[in-house]
Image (spheres, rainbow, N blue to C red):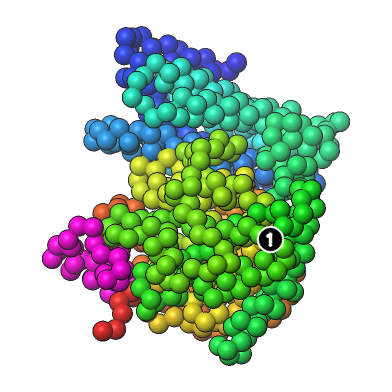
Amino acid sequence: MGALYESFGRELDACARRYSGSPKDEMVALCLLALEREELVAVGYRENVLVPRLASLRVDDSVREIIRHALLWTWKDEEMHTIYIRGAILKLANWPLRFAAFSRQLAGAVAGWSASVRQHVSWSAAPIARALATGSAGVGALIGRIPRGVCRHLKYGPLRNFCTFNVDAERTAWLCWKRMAELAERVSGLPANTAADFRRVQTDEERHAKIFQILADALNENDELVEGESEETLCEKIGEVGEFFLPRGMRKHFVTRNPLGSGGKVFLREGKALDQKIPLFKQIVRESGLVERLRERARELGKRTDEVTVAIKPAFMMGYDRRDTSMITDPVLLDVLAVTLKEAGCTDVAVVESRNIYDQFFGARTVSEVARYFGYDSPNYRVVDGSEDQVHYSYMRGLAQYSVARTWKEADFRITFGKMRSHPVELAYLTVGNVEWMGGRCDQFIFVERQAQRETAIMMLLDEFPPHFSILEGYESAADGLVGVMGCPRPKSPLRYYAGADALAVDIVAARHMGVRDPRKSSLLRAACHWFGNPSGSIDVVGADTPLPDWCDPYHNEISTMLSLMAFPVYVMGSGRGSLFLPEMDQSAFPFIEPETTLQRFSRRMVRHLIGLNHAK
């Protein structure tokens, strides 16, 4: 073991002596230490630093991609750990502790930036950044925050040196989480999953150490593969640690069970008039091969078609008034889809939706009540409330999500039937994001005490329970502008449908037509590409691959762009947990749970006016 591991071991022993007899205080102290460390490596491993560094490797592009993905997945793990442990600390609701948490996270971010610059950026490439990073490291060494033995590793050199150093760093993290898990088992009053989550992070850190060791052994001092190492041997070794550390095309088991990231054909049909809505929808359902994919799935499961259970995830719980249906799946089209499935032989078709944050402020917001209000009452399917249908589930990847809607989980054939909508943060909110509420409530993954990012929770669902088919509806009414996900008083009529087996491919094509040319600009699509692979290079668009002529994305002008950039921090920190961002709900159907005060009424009207969600009187 190296100097870093030995130094950290002494620090752990000192912490145990300091808090002898108080396992809770010791655990809190270690949580703060873990937060600082996780933020440090999350910043230090970030993609925009490592990718340019990897470009200098003297290896084939295929080998470079293997190394890139292994480090990228390690980075994403560390990001998840940071959010998880920060949320765990903040949930203790102690203001001094909250301040300490944010302070330690900031310290970790500064240290991570400093380390990454010193290890991956040369003096000639960025002299000012190098000077600042060197000064920061020097201050850290003087005040004892950086052990003397560590300083010599914080310098530009072969990637092998970086990997060797991080083998030690990941082992210290393993040691910390191991001790935290032991303490969590002795502390009463913690959430039921705390110790298990700590063990899971401990296992992640062990995997990371193995990945860095594999890479350190594979490279020499000239950033070349050592003799005897090849693309095949490197792929095999990394795959033994976990195939999610490999690019999608090199995974053996994932590809057979999950269509996301596979690319292939994306079908697009555009009409010329509103009265073509139903005929054109039937056409794209037929031409895109939905029924053929259903029968193929039945053969995979060894079932007859009439034995296959189908779950459809539409979008209608953001609906607030019949005057504005721009953000909900057309109930007429949903019925047409259900009839198609019945005609193909399916006898059990379920429509699954879940409650959202609106039920915190308005009554009559159960799934069945909202479904009846908007006309989702066909005899061709049954409506399931995913919020009441939740069952415990242990996800293989990710943290802080512990359940899934049983109907979605157990369905043999899953369809995400999304709505074309803009989004102030995601820019486009389509079929991938549409599965969001099939797990825990979405508001658990939004506000500052969250223990997982919203996109991570969605990726966990998509990884374990992916849709087998994707349909995007944007025909008669679709919400553009700044907050299309909430609605649009003056919606567009794009007259378009999209469909395909790969929901990510469908979304990338549709988002491009909506003005999102680079999927990485959307945190949701970027996360999906990280988890499942970017299918952009293998997509075949069947139909008119042209942008929507009149669509206004959230960046369509300077004011909207500024509001879009401010949207996430304002909503998380200054919205009163969403209470200020409420649409003009139909009060005759969905009355306020608590009477609205004059100040609330004024504030909400002002916000609606600001984001363009006011209806003309």
Please, is residue 473 above or below residue 302 in the view?
below
Q: Quadrant of the C terminus?
A: bottom left
Query: Residue 464, percent across and down?
Result: 62, 44
Query: Residue 495, percent across and down?
Result: 57, 83
- Amino acid of disc 1: Cys
479 left or right of 236? left
Is residue 26 visible to the viewer in this orientation of the structure? Answer: no
Q: Quadrant of the N terminus?
A: top right
Please, is residue 484 above or below residue 55 in the view?
below
Instruction: Name which residue lies at 52% across and 47% down.
Output: 405
Q: Characterize the local packing of mark 1: few (<14), some (14-19) or many (20 or more) Cα atoms within 10 angstroms.
A: some
**Snapshot quadrant of residue 146:** top left
Instruction: Name which residue lies at 44% across and 37% down.
Output: 84
Residue identifier under label 1: 346
Q: Is residue 388 magenta?
A: no
Please, is residue 564 above or below residue 16 in the view?
below
Please, is residue 297 above or below residue 63 in the view?
below
381 left or right of 66? left
Query: Residue 78, percent across and down?
Result: 52, 37
Is residue 551 visible to the viewer in this orientation of the structure? Answer: yes
- Name the foreground residue: 572 vs 409: 409
Helix, strand, or loop for circle 1?
Answer: loop
Query: Residue 40, percent across and down?
Result: 47, 36
Instruction: Name which residue lies at 20% across and 57% down.
Output: 594
Instruction: Name which residue lies at 61% across and 67% down.
Output: 338
The residue segment tinted magenta is 582-611
